[in-house]
Image (cartoon, rainbow, N blue to C red):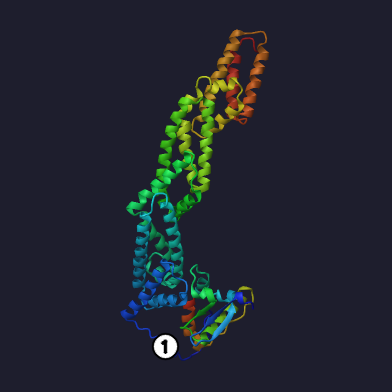
Amino acid sequence: MRKEDTVKLISAEGFEFVIDKEAAMVSQTIRNMLTSPGSFAETEHGEVTFPEISTVILEKICQYFYWSLQYARGKETEFPIEPELTLELMMAANYLHT
Amino acid sequence: MSAPKNRTFQIEAFKFKHQVGVDPKYAEKTWNILEHAIHEIYNHNASGNNFEELYVNAYNMVLHKFGEKLYSGLVTTITFHLKEMSSSIEAAQEGLFLEELNSKWEDHNKALQMIRDIFMYMDRTFIPSTHKTPVHELGLNLWRDVVIHSSKIQTRLQDTLLELIQRERDGEVINRELMRNITKMLMDLGSSVYQNDFEKQFLESSAHFYRLESQKFIQSCDCMEYLKEAERYLNEEKERVSHYLDAKTEVKITNVVEKELIESHMVRLVHMENSGLVNMIVDDKYEDLGRMYSLFHRVPNGFALIRDVMTSYIQQTGQQLVAEDPEDFVERLLDLKDKYDKIIGLAFSNDETFQNAFNSSFEYFIDLNARSP
């Protein structure tokens, strides 16, 4: 993956997930962050820190992004969610506007 | 996201990652961070700020039911900055007023966008449920109320705009792009703002201007020159609208020009000595006749006037011809018909009503002649 098309998402524990920008923009919040006119630190370095989201949840969310792109292209599979994660996942989804 | 499978499970106590209390002190602290950020944004100091941190602060405030504090704090802070901008605009020197206004407007817009992005969570959740104005609209309304409608700025803005337009009418070159930015700003604030703060006065002062101009011209020009001037003015106004006014103004200003330049002086023009309609017909002035046709077309009763005068003239000449009863009567008659056919074709776009009027007047005086079959 080329550097310019990716963005780094960092979890509360410091884990770094490097994903395509297209995938990250499934989240409205991230999309706004990256396209905001102000020169915020995020747009400069291409990385966003989420001190409130744990690694496990962030990993699931990244998976969700890719699944969502696939689904939009016609590949209608299921997205498995472990029940233990649901509550935190929902909070994160609300936060990220996904 | 898709719903989880139905299975009994234990929900662990959900712990907030941060020490987030629901006490007002926390809210105060959070708000201060945000307020500081807004100040930075308006002072062009925002680079290097961590968007996520600000976003999460706004998010937390709304989540813990401090949305009201957030919203009213936002209003106060923006108002404070707008008042500052307002003073700086008021203090601008002659000639730099519009530029200052425009540059502050651009600053405000940029800041507003950034603020809206940070407060997006509030926009999404708190505002719909409390029916308050969304951030972007709020920013526009505040701009309108604090800056545009401030007593010193409102009149100065209107006067400056009108003065520049008048200077352009007198032949000066003005900064059209700046004008366009300003009128666009007024439209962005709402078409009623555009109309009340600018358009109404514009139409009124233009009417006044054209009334005076037409008086001047009608004394000094003959009909054909006058019509040329009228056409030139109409084109000029149309071009003005396309360059820096809102498209909807075109119809209104055109009506004003038509009324003052043409409608008020229609009758006098048509009957003008040595250059009126009759003279044009006699001298076969097709271009001028065509111009009169297209200009009078725009005003009510314009056509009727031309038609009536033409008809009575035809009847008059016809009657004369009949009375004289010369040798080549028929030939002269045919000449007359050719002449008018040409006029109607070249100048009046083969307008049927004119053709009919012509035919009936011809019939009228032919009937007078006992000799015609």
Which of B47/B335 is in front? Answer: B47
**Residue A34 location (% of width, % of height):** 53, 72
Is B262 left, or right, of A76 in this rendering?
Answer: left
Q: Quadrant of residue B363?
A: top right
Q: Secondary structure at mark 1?
A: loop
Residue shown at 42% from the left, 32% from the top: B212
**Residue B276 location (% of width, % of height):** 53, 23
Q: How many marks?
A: 1
The residue pinned by badge 1 equals: B15
Give above or below for B101 relative to A5: above
| Quadrant holding the C terminus of chain B | top right
Give above or below for A92 relative to B236: below
Crowd around label 1: few <14 · some 14–19 · many ≥20 (10 Å): few
Which of B305/B105 is in front? Answer: B105
Which of B76/A56 is in front? Answer: B76
Res. B241 visible in picture: yes
Residue shown at 53% from the left, 28% from the top: B225
The answer for which chain carries disc 1 is B
Res. A98 visible in picture: no
**Residue B270 location (% of width, % of height):** 51, 24
Q: Mark 1 is on which residue type?
A: Lys
**Residue B299 location (% of width, % of height):** 49, 33
Point out the residue furthest to the left here. Answer: B24
Give above or below for A14 relative to B90: below
